[in-house]
Amino acid sequence: MSTLSDLAHAQGRLTDSDVEWLHRLAGDGQLLADLASADIVIWIQTEDGSFVAVAHARPSGAATLFYRDIVGERVRPQWRTQVQGAFESAKIVDSSSPDWFEETPTRVRAVPIVRDRGNADHGPMVIGVVTRHTNLGEARTPSRQQITFDECANDLFRMIADGSFPDLAAPTSPRRGAPRASDGLIRIDVDGITTFASPNALSAFNRMGFDDELEGESLAEVTTRLVPPSRQVDESLPVVVTGRAPWRTDIEARGVTVSLRAIPLKDHGTRIGAIVLCRDVSELRHQEQELITKDATIREIHHRVKNNLQTVASLLRIQARRTHSDEARDALTQAMRRVDSIAVVHDTLAQGLTQKVDFDEVFHRVLKLVAEVASAPNTRARTQSTGRFGVLPSEYATPLALALTEVVTNAVEHGLAGREGLVTIDATRTEDNLRVTVHDTGLGLPEGRIGQGLGTQIIRTLIQGELGGTIEWRGADGEGTEVVIDIPLRWLQP
């Protein structure tokens, strides 16, 4: 668990919703740091009344004050009064004079993190404090972009102090390539008119075919003109480009894809405009599409391989039925069962997007297949599976499924031949090892000898050769047989 969650939950006065609020705010810490060109620190009050840093973001376009990690440290004496004041008064507290931090002049702002839990008895509650640490040693004449970024930061700080930022209704876990302030920022007023567009934002729209200036234009009308009428657009696009909801979407035109994120700006609950972050994610989306296409192709290949294997198994079944030799019929039946076991693995892979398989699902299907095919007319075999195999890479699922098919088949056909009995399969998995124990209540190994047939050779080749494991047969006449397979998990890494 993160330091933020550890301390917030241990603090006791905070609910799970409060902790989620703090996580959301910490997730936007980089945005605040980049807009304010300052270090951003989130503080949580501990049981003894002190404050501990639980999150820290450094500015991308300015020098950081904290070269060492500050998370986990208690608030320093020169900030304690300011942080305590913001926490107790629920108001923003600015330093009255420059604060010196390691011989660097700084300006500190303490912002209360306010939550309105909707409880009429208690009202809004302060759950923490955000501090903004501005390096005054590198002060320069601010550009128009810096002034706008600073104004946006101040708007967000005021929203934090009145409990309207962050918004828990906003989507979490953004797609790869979520826009940042440095990628492009557009500020729009309450009517959706652009009042500022950073050079990177303007370049992104230029690449989509907009050749004019964005300032003074309705962002919604601009995007409407850019998107071809024939292209289907995300239904969330209108609320994003008008700044009415804290949402994310993509817009695509002329082969260029731009990701947009809207952050509505409010003043005591009244919407005053919005920040729209934008980023050219054409290459990222192209890579994602290639991965989707690759996954679909691999799944189709597995599906066709499964169909072909099932066709082969059907041909073997037909041939087995028509042969008059018992020995040939048994050989063909065994070959059919092995092919079917491999087909089960490919069928499972064809249903997922990763090259890993839930082997418990695979083995359940294989076990039913073995029990149905291997039982002779006078044999009543019951199977029982315990434990869990877990998820395995696809390249090891096939040899393990085939090896277990052979082991269980031998237990049914030879150990329980002509009698009633039970075959149990137990899987025990640790971080370093997978152990599978197959035990039957049959006659046991004749004179303790291991068979030398094709099935045994296949099992040894698969377990020892392909999986790097070991296999041991145990048992004696009248006591059944136990087969123990050990596979080191270092061989099972994808």
Image: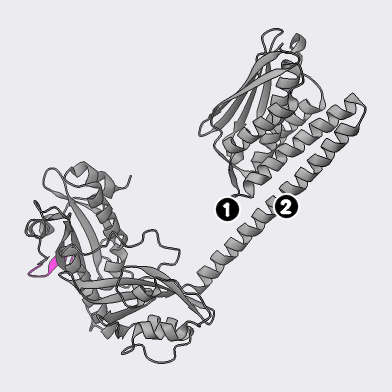
The amino acid sitting under disc 1 is Leu
Image height check: is 440 above or below 357?
above
Estimate how packed mark 2 is, as few (under 14), some (14 to 19) or many (20 or more) residues with alpha carbons within 10 Å: some
Q: Secondary structure at mark 1?
A: loop
The amino acid sitting under disc 2 is Arg
Front-lying residue, 205 or 316:
316
Image height check: is 330 above or below 227?
above
The residue indicated by pointer 2 is 304
Q: Residues in magenta?
A: 95-103
Q: Position of residue 487 (x, y in %)?
A: 61, 31
Q: Position of residue 117 (x, y in %)?
A: 17, 54
What's the mark number on residue 312? Answer: none
Task: Name the residue at the bottom extreme.
Answer: 212
Query: Is 90 situated left or right of 154 in this image?
Result: left
Label 1 and label 2: CA atoms lie apart by 16 Å
What's the mark number on residue 353? Answer: 1
